[in-house]
Amino acid sequence: MKTVETEKITLAFGAAGGQPTAVEIPVGAVIQRTYWHNVWRRVSRDPFTVACALVLTVVAAAALFAPWLGLPEPTLTNSANRLLPVGSPGHLLGTDELGRDMFSRLIYGGRLSLMMGILPVLVALLVGGTLGLIAGFVGGRVNMLIMRITDVFYAFPSILLAVAIAGSLGAGIGNALLAITIVFIPPLTRVTESVTTQVRAMDFVEAARASGAGTFTIIRIHVLGNVLGPIFVYATVLISVSIVISAGLSFIGLGASPPDAEWGLMLNTLREAIFLAPLNSVLPGFMIFIASMCFNLISDGLRSAMDVRL
């Protein structure tokens, strides 16, 4: 029977009596942690980031599984139960101006509000990240062309640009999503191009070129991994901005339309009842605030964990 010997590492320590002490540790016992594993450990030890992630998880899970929670129909009206106060029997958070259950509408409203906050950023991240990688890595006239087109969009504030695009396209959720996506492509392109330009000039990229590696291989292995951190942190910030902008578009009638449950639209329909039922009227705004603030705090936690400077 053959004996399998395990490769070991010998560590020497100085003992109290002056004699060195050697300790052998099996190689398999040495835990090799990657960069992303260390980031996860640092994030998991941040109480504010963890708390915000839990809040968003609860809100998203409740919105996703709302049909199975036994909630009242969010579009069911009842004129006899208009503007019931918070804590009314059968209506935990009261009712709105048409007698619809506020708690149900807030939960169902999380579907549209979170989707309109996350989806435009994901699409803009794909488009803007690709353009920024190309501009930053290729450089030259390609960089100038892409970045000058990007600069045109910086002449307008993001909210006004979103309103202008959505207004020209017409009211509707699809047009609002497209408008917000277009607004977020330029800043994501600029951040990606800036980080890629810095990484391109580093020694390991030059060494990869000298070794004969192709452009796609260099971008995929050496560049992309080093630019994901700053881009991901910035995209998390944009999600909170996207939630506010989408709610604003719905508030002025360019986003969701009645009888859809959406936090910005709910603010619009309840604004006339703010003196009759002030607490009911501010609940949608409170949800917008909580969601956007949680994404902002998560972004701060990720920035600290990744040691990213934007």
Image: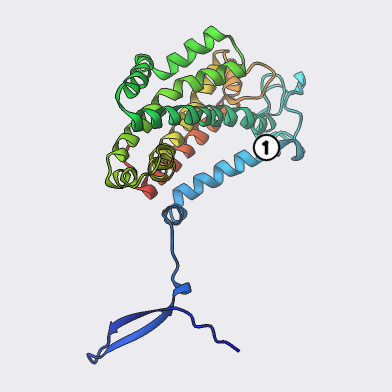
Percent across and percent down for residue 193 are 35, 31
User: So how many labels did they put on this image?
Assistant: 1
Q: Image point 30% across, 47% down: which residue?
A: 207
Tell me which amino acid carries mark 1.
Leu
Residue 188 in the image: state x and y as whole percent.
41, 29
Closer to us: 207 or 130: 207
On screen, residue 98 versus residue 292, left or right, reads right
- Residue closer to the observer: 88 or 41: 41
**In front: 18, or 276?**
18
Q: Position of residue 300 (x, y in %)?
A: 39, 42
12 vs 280: above or below: below
Quadrant occupied by the N terminus: bottom right
Within 10 Å of disc 1 (Cα), the crowding (few <14, some 14-19, many 20+) is some
Q: Is residue 135 visible?
A: yes
* Furthest residue in direction left, as rendered: 18
Above or below, comparing residue 36 to residue 182 in the picture: below
In the displayed structure, does residue 136 sit left or right of residue 243? left
Q: Could you tell me which residue is drawn at 60 percent across and 23 percent down?
A: 277
Residue 41 sits above or below residue 162 on the image: below
Residue furthest to the front: 212
Quarter of the image where the C terminus is located? top left
Residue at image coords 46%, 47%: 49
Question: Residue 281's image quarter?
Answer: top right
Q: Which residue is mark 1?
A: 64
Q: Residue at x 54, y 13 (%)?
A: 252
Secondary structure beneath disc 1? helix
